[in-house]
Amino acid sequence: MGPNNMKLNDKKIIVAEFNELVPHLVEKLMNEGHMPNFRKLANISSCHITDAQQIGEGLNPWIQWVTVHTGLTPKEHGVYRLNEAKNCEGKYIWDKLSKDGEYSLIFGSMNGCIQDTFIGTYLPDPWDKVTKPSDNLQEYFEFIRAYVQGNPNASKVSPVQFLKFMLLNGLSLKTCYKIAKQLISEKIDSKKKWKRACLLDWIQLDVFRSLYKKNSPKLSTIFSNSTAHVQHTLWAESFPEDFPNGVDKKMSGNPMLDAYKNHDEILGEILKLKSENVDIAICTALSQQPYTKNTKCFYRISNFNKFLAKLNVLGAPSYLPVMAEQFYMKFSNEADVQKAFEHLSKFEMPDSKYFYEGSNKVFSMSIEQTTLHIKCRCSTAVEETISFFHVGTKEEYAFYDMFYLMDDQKTGVHHPHGLFWITDSNTGSKNEIIPLEKVHQKILEKMG
């Protein structure tokens, strides 16, 4: 994966992949003076609104980012879940560049993969169970992935090893200051723990910047999910006026404003890497809107071994957490995964009121070879005394004996529009709507 045999083509591009930022909020916050670096970039860029042209389950970031990176619609690329990128029907933009001998730095881009011929440095997204990072990022990836998935004890890399890696790979005084400030603020107010997601942006930036300066890549991407996470869970806390039924605010301040300002500061650091032959782009792939229908809850299984034993799931599957309430069950053969699917399909809740839509089935599931993709479907408040049951045996199971309510409650949901800005001498194009798949071609054209 070294930069050998690189072609000498001057034009380079850095793509800041700020997942799910909302176009009208960016405009509002720029006008209010909160995002000076976004304003600076907008003034020297061709600015587009992208349209993913998807709804429902087809509108998820692990689908839309594949569209950005391949130039194909979901129907064309065929990737609808995390960890399915290997089945993509098209080529990722960095593999196209590798074919031409160009070096890429891909830092956390969502639901990506690389071919054996890839030239560059590659860091998978922290939910990736399939693609291996570049050798020099193995320790970093192992540590970050465990923490992002909420299971730090699963990391084979100790905090001391991680700190040593960071000291050797660009850890800045600014990031150290932000980490210390965050830890102190949590001692004063535990409700500020949500800001830890923003700290990851600065850790990522430090390592990305160090690698960028060493390798001078043709294409560089750096992915951030912090604002997307905040919007999903804290929109009501941030903009209560968007919720007609009223909001009982539990926090001081505006978490989304803080998250957007954090991204503006990150962008300011990225803009320092711009030069005559280096263009800067922002892409969000999609965005969000307030979820005002009701309180949307998430439930996660409390103990996997207990889950298997109590519900009599056979086949000794292994457990792989994914995002929020989602997880995978990996079986040794296809017969066992099919049996588990059929068995778990027979568990139901006593009332449809516990679901946003659809049947009363407890689990949403799908099969991929020997892997069962699964999550609890309940999306509204479940009372403490409620039990679910097996439709065949009629045996009942206390709901909270198996699941727990996650702290996060969804107040933001996906919207198909997003942002794509790219530095351009022709800045006349402002907020023109383009299909999301066109982003891929515009990036290629910019690199020449």
Image (cartoon, helix red, strand yellow):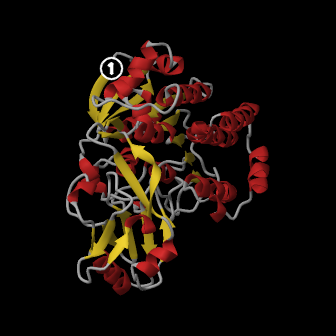
The amino acid type of the residue labelled 1 equals Ser
User: Residue 276 is drawn in which quadrant?
Assistant: top right
Q: Position of residue 19 (x, y in %)?
A: 44, 39
User: Residue 292 is drawn in which quadrant?
Assistant: top left
Rendered residue at 52%/32% (across/down): 11
Q: For mark 1, what is the residue?
A: 429
Q: Is residue 222 visible?
A: yes
Q: 64 above or below 178?
A: below
133 or 358: nearer the viewer: 358
Q: Is residue 345 visible?
A: no
Rendered residue at 57%/38% (across/down): 191
In the rendered image, the quadrant that contains the C terminus is top left
Q: Position of residue 234 (x, y in %)?
A: 44, 36
Bin the neighbour count of mark 1 within 10 Å (Cα to Cα): few under 14, some 14-19, many 20 and up.
few
Q: Is residue 161 left or right of residue 10?
A: right
Q: Position of residue 362 (x, y in %)?
A: 30, 66
Q: Is residue 121 left or right of residue 354?
A: right
